[in-house]
Amino acid sequence: SQQGEEDPQALSIQEGENATMNCSYKTSINNLQWYRQNSGRGLVHLILIRSNEREKHSGRLRVTLDTSKKSSSLLITASRAADTASYFCATVPPSNTGKLIFGQGTTLQVKP
Amino acid sequence: DAGVIQSPRHEVTEMGQEVTLRCKLISGHNSLFWYRQTMMRGLELLIYFNNNVPIDDSGMPEDRFSAKMPNASFSTLKIQPSEPRDSAVYFCASSRDRGGGNTIYFGEGSWLTVV
């Protein structure tokens, strides 16, 4: 069963623009993670934000977490064509058993 | 440092045949996850192991699916007999602990088509 729902399902922007993807989830979490998947490849971990954190940065990535709204957002600034991929949020329950539950993903296309 | 290694990368098989997917964990990792990805259902966690012990297999679709860890660095996912609805990409992933707070590393996937 899917825990998270990403919004939008698909996003198309021009190179240099910012891309924002949102993730909503249903139950309490220990942490939330974002992954990227290039076409035909496996998933690659981007960033992890814990339930007691509100914002985190990594390079051109900025992640926010609002546990009261059970939502997170991933912002990619100054996008590049190479950022074209699918982006998934994944949640870990408070029991922290390692069970990572993924959302359906957002497909991002960055046009050169 | 080699990542998670899966084999085969692609397999086409006939309905009713046995399928075995293989996975080699990253050295030093002790948690192993099998995921299945389809367009309709997205990424589904099938089963995960910690220190060779299955912790949660609630995602395994039915008795036709079985997973094992014969040793700390290797796992198999078996489907017997296979059905067309099993067609999907199967990912193996590993992490250093139970994975809750640590990064999970994915293999490149095994693309299974059952005809």
Image (tube, rainbow, N blue to C red):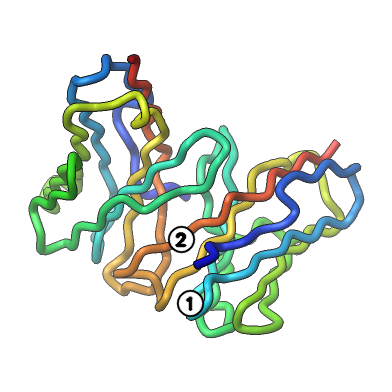
Q: Name the residue under label 2.
A: B105
Question: Label 2 is found on which chain of the structure?
Answer: B
Q: In which quarter of the image is residue A59?
A: top left
Q: Quadrant of residue A95?
A: bottom left
Q: Which secondary structure, mark 1?
A: loop
The quadrant of the picture occupied by the C terminus of chain B is: top right
| Residue under disc 1 on the same chain as residue under disc 2 | yes
Q: In which quarter of the image is residue B85?
A: top right
Looking at the image, residue B27 lies above or below residue B38: below
Number of other residues with Cα within 10 Å of mark 1, as a class: few under 14, some 14 to 19, many 20 or more: many
Measure the alpha-carbon separation of dots 1 and 2. 10 Å
**Which residue is located at x 90 percent, y 42 percent?**
B14
Q: In this view, does A112 lie above or below B106?
A: above
Q: Which residue lies furthest to the front in this view?
A: B1
Q: Is residue A44 left or right of residue B11?
A: left
Amino acid beneath label 1:
His
> Which residue in the structure is indicated by mark 1?
B29
| Residue A30 sits above or below residue A101 on the image | below
Query: In terms of depth relative to the viewer, which is nearer, A81 or B16?
Result: A81
Which residue is at a point 59% across and 54% down the rendered structure image?
Answer: B91
Name which residue lies at 46% across and 48% down.
Answer: A43
* Camera-nearest residue between B114 and A59: A59
Q: Is mark 2 on a helix, strand or loop?
A: strand
The reply, left or right, for residue B47 in relation to residue A88 is right
